[in-house]
Amino acid sequence: MKTRITIAGLVIALMLVAGPFNVLARGDGFNDAVKTIEQFYHVKHQSIPLLARAGMKAVRTAAKIKGGDYQRLAEAGSVRVAFFEDQNFDSRGEIATFKASMQAVLTREWSPLVQTLAPKDEQQTYIYIRDAGEKFQALVVNIERHEATVIQATITPAVLAQLMKDPEGMGKTLTEDATINDH
Amino acid sequence: MKNLFQITWKLLPVLLLLLTGSAVTALGQGPKLQIDQLDALANRASETVDVRLDERLMATTAKFFSGKDDADIKEVLKGIKGIYVKSFTFEKEGEYTQVEVDSVMSQLRGSTWSKVVSVKSKKDGENVEVYLNMIGDQITGLAVLSIEPKEFTVVNIVGPIDLEKLTKLEGQFGVPELGIETDKTKKK
């Protein structure tokens, strides 16, 4: 009887421990995308505070200049950004493999919306979308020869509808919007 | 018994191919084409564009085209359940084969698809083929294949779409400028 109770206790304990691990294993899209880039290209992402100390990049400065009545697309406080700078992104002729890897890790909850690839220049843009209640979450991955960004932001269906008119330009628009420094 | 196992084992690749073939054919009967098999072309292409606006996305966002400028778009998109585009540009000729073209064409040989013969491209030397998926009198989908020596594009729109609507979508929602010219658009 005592053994049975011990076994039952162990099973319950295992289930309780396994729960959070399952959640971690499922991933959240943003981290999965960052990890996939790091593993495929053997690069490391940089955190925002480090970059903030290093100074603003031209693209972000240009976006900031827009200023004035410029209306942000991403919902306030919803933006997550990871940068890869001054690193080497070489697909070694296997750009389709990288695309498939991204697809494989994001396939559960995220729907691919746009993917543009130019292997010669190592330029890639991936936009994934998922439901977030009444809104949507957009995951934008931009990769160039020496830098990359991963951005996740919440957007309203109205914003998404307007962006959908030009799906190929959506990645650039969302990236610029999400990396504007308001301070 | 061992013999039977050996025969089955030997025939396994053939069986798998038959199963895959029948799956593609089955998919080809509907307006949504299976085009993901073209993804491998990305390694050889100098540029790849892959756009996928699915039913859920179209349905959720459709009601947000409410502005004055959006009235026309809203009408064109009415009932559209999906827009799927894959476009590959190559530096040299011969970078893609008939096998890849046939993987799409074979689906268009299904009984519900028919080629629109009155379509030409305004662009010089461009070979554009347009197919309509019909159930009775209803158009349920459209496919455009642009087959060029250095370019291969597939556009698949699911839902009630005609050529006039297609020309209005060119350059928007991921649909490339195909330069489609029909008898109707020519008169204008």
Image (cartoon, rainbow, N blue to C red):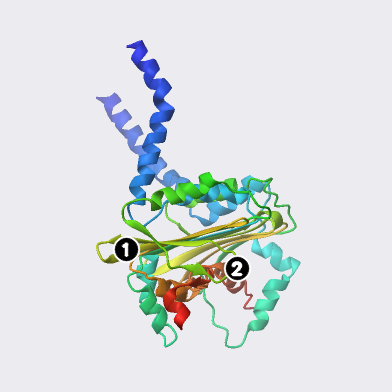
**What chain letter is assigned to the residue under label 1?**
B
Q: Quadrant of residue B148?
A: bottom right
Specify the label residue B124 is tagged with: 2
* Residue at 46% over, 47% down: B103
Q: Nearer the viewer, residue A149 or A167?
A: A167
Residue located beneath label 1 in the image: B140
Mark 2 on the same chain as mark 1: yes
- B64 displayed left or right of A83: left
Q: Nearer the viewer, residue A142 or B17?
A: B17
Secondary structure beneath disc 1?
strand
Give the residue type that dot 1 points to. Answer: Thr
Secondary structure beneath disc 2?
loop
- Label 2 Cα neighbours within 10 Å, binned few <14 / some 14-19 / many ≥20: few
- B26 displayed left or right of A60: left
* Residue at 36% over, 16% down: B5
Q: Position of residue A38 (x, y in %)?
A: 63, 49
Residue farthest to the top, as pictured: B2
Specify the label residue A69 is tagged with: none
State which tag comes first along the sequence, 2 or 1: 2
Question: Can you say which quadrant of the picture contains the N terminus of chain A?
Answer: top left
Is A67 rendered above or below residue B85? Answer: below
Is B169 rendered above or below residue A48? Answer: below
* Residue at 31% over, 52% down: B111
Q: Position of residue B57 (x, y in %)?
A: 39, 66
- A96 displayed left or right of B183: right
Is A38 rendered above or below residue B57? Answer: above
Q: Position of residue B121 (x, y in %)?
A: 53, 68
* Residue at 34% over, 74% down: B78
Estimate the spatial distance between the alpha carbons at disc 2 and disc 1, rounded to whole Å.
30 Å
